Image (cartoon, helix red, strand yellow):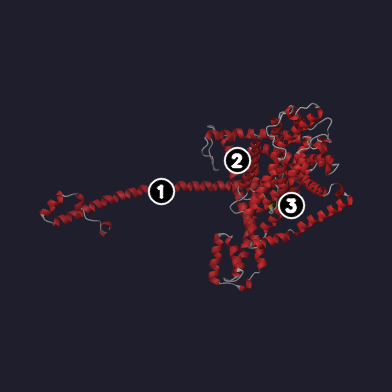
Amino acid sequence: MAVATLAFELAGAFLLAAGMLWKYGNLKKSTPGVVLAVFIAWYFSLCIVTVLPNDVSATFYRQCLSDKSVANSFPYDPSSLCIKPVSYVDGTVIPRLYRVVYWTTQLFTWLLIPFLSAYVQAGEFSVLAKAKTALIDNAIYYGIYVLIIIVLLIYALAAGLFQDQGASALKQMAIQAANTWGLFLLVLLLGYGLVELPRSYWHRSSIQHQLEWEYFSLAKVTEDKHEATEELNLILIEVKKASKGVPFGHVLRKHVNTILKKCPAAFQEEVAREEAQNGPNEDLMPSERSLIRLHKKLNTALQRENRTQTQFKLFLQRALYSEDVIKNRLSADRTWKCNYSTDDNTWLPASFKWWWRCIFRSHVMKALSILFALFSAMVIWSECTFSLQNPTLSIFAILVRHWASVKNYFNLELFCFITIAYLCLCAYWTLFQIKLFNIYYIAPNHHTDDYSLLFIGMFLCRLTPPLCLNFLCLIHMDSGVTDGAELVDVAYTDLSGHLSLISDRFFIYFPILIVLLCTGTYFKLGTRCLSSIGFAQFLQSDELTTDLMEEGKAFVNREKRRIERETKKDERNYNERGTTSSSAHNESFSSANWDRVNEERVSLLKDNDSGDDQWDSGAKGSSSSSRPNRSLFDDV
């Protein structure tokens, strides 16, 4: 049963990572090595999260064994006095799993993923050339690591750490340095997600607010779409010049052909037609380095143009759907009718869709928002009080200790999983919301580029270890926080260390930063600052937001008029086809009658020329044999 539970948890993490990669990545066009690296980074990061509740319950069981063996002087087996969790596995399985997963993610986040990020952005035309460029681009990146290692070595030698602990001291210092970096990132992401995630679900419950946001987003993505199209057109002009400057048979022609294959088909035909008419112009001969830069710019421009086009259609369909929801709410028969939006769920009953989309969905979103808000309040309170041991004020620590005391390991593991899952949801949701100009952008519907996928994988690997340590602090399972020398350590802290090793003042700064960031997010201070310096942000009291909403509404109205014209055109074509088929039927009927009359006339003429015997024989024969074959004059 324990092995099955562990396998189920690992399989769940596998399916979740695969589903996320399928939703955001384009598996058909992405580099296979990049897809594999991203999947491993995402999957291993989620593995730690799913296995950690088992580690917590196993730790309480080992703590019970330790307490019973010390308290009882009788020759009893301590395991007979403690209830073993159903999910308990052999004591070496989880630590070994942690070591494999942890060091693999660290290798990926600090070495492999930065190399692959530079590789996918390189514009070279061969694998070896791209790898060489990636190594050169990461020389400064890796040089910083070497410098940090040298500083740590000097510090360890000066402090005499190698004399006491040996090389393990350097390893612990490296782990704590990575944890410190991840904790600062965790503070930023949690400070935003703990407030904004419940608020986003509350806004989703209001279809009017959702429609206004879609108008605003549609106007913003339209601007991005125009900029992407203009940028692509300028790059295509450069491609055309490069193609004219490199004649067929030249050594650089294969590079030009590689670039042309990625251009739109109409553009390729235009270039081929112009080159056939005018021939090459050697004055425009580019260098290999310029072709590499052009190739890199073209890849970025094509990805951006494709993404903005898809986002424009997506926001447009969402806006049409929201307008249909508002109109259907006024429906008296309570059945869903699509006015302008497309309905993919045609197999659902119309009445069920009306009740869900017009009534129930709003209440479900409000309930989720309230639930998330309560959980966020519990997290913020526990973050501020987890350093206090007597009395215990952390809500999560109180509940976990209660279920551990009554040996209810199922509720304990379930509560731990829900807690750490919510922390991951807030942090990862914030990470997926970040849009760094045109360099890093997470877009659903298979429109996230390789660089952005690698970016997410790198930060998940860096964020997960400190997030797990923070969770252990919330439930008072980190002996460095609880100051309990007699407590049995969780297997995860044996590998990643304790938060107390980072700084003695960490327990003061961390809660203060969380509260400050949550307060700033609640009052939208960051959004207001960005809006004040010219970045369009969704603030309903802002004039720029109102203008963009009106612009987005104009796009939606234009799309509705286009749909109406196409609908009328289809109806007109249908009516014309019906009229044409009716007239064709009448014409065919008249033609048949006219042919029959002509055949009878010809038959009479032939009969008049024949004798009486022929008439008699013709009259006795079949009608088909008496009629001549159709000739050219029948149509005349």
Precedes in sequence: disc 3 or disc 2: 3
Q: Secondary structure at mark 2?
A: helix
Instruction: Return the residue at label 3.
Output: 110
Which residue sits at x=19%, y=49%?
Answer: 623
Q: Is residue 398 left or right of residue 248?
A: right
Instruction: Return the residue at label 2.
Output: 322
In the rendered image, residue 403, in percent from the top left (x then y), is placed at 73, 29
Report the residue that reaches farthest toward the left: 612
Quarter assignment of residue 385: top right
Which residue sits at x=56%, y=48%?
Answer: 559
In the rendered image, residue 470, in percent from the top left (x then y), is placed at 77, 40
Which residue sits at x=63%, y=71%?
Answer: 285
Report the residue that reaches farthest toward the front: 75
Q: Secondary structure at mark 1?
A: helix
In the rendered image, residue 560, in percent from the top left (x then y), is placed at 55, 46
Instruction: Return the residue at label 1.
Output: 577
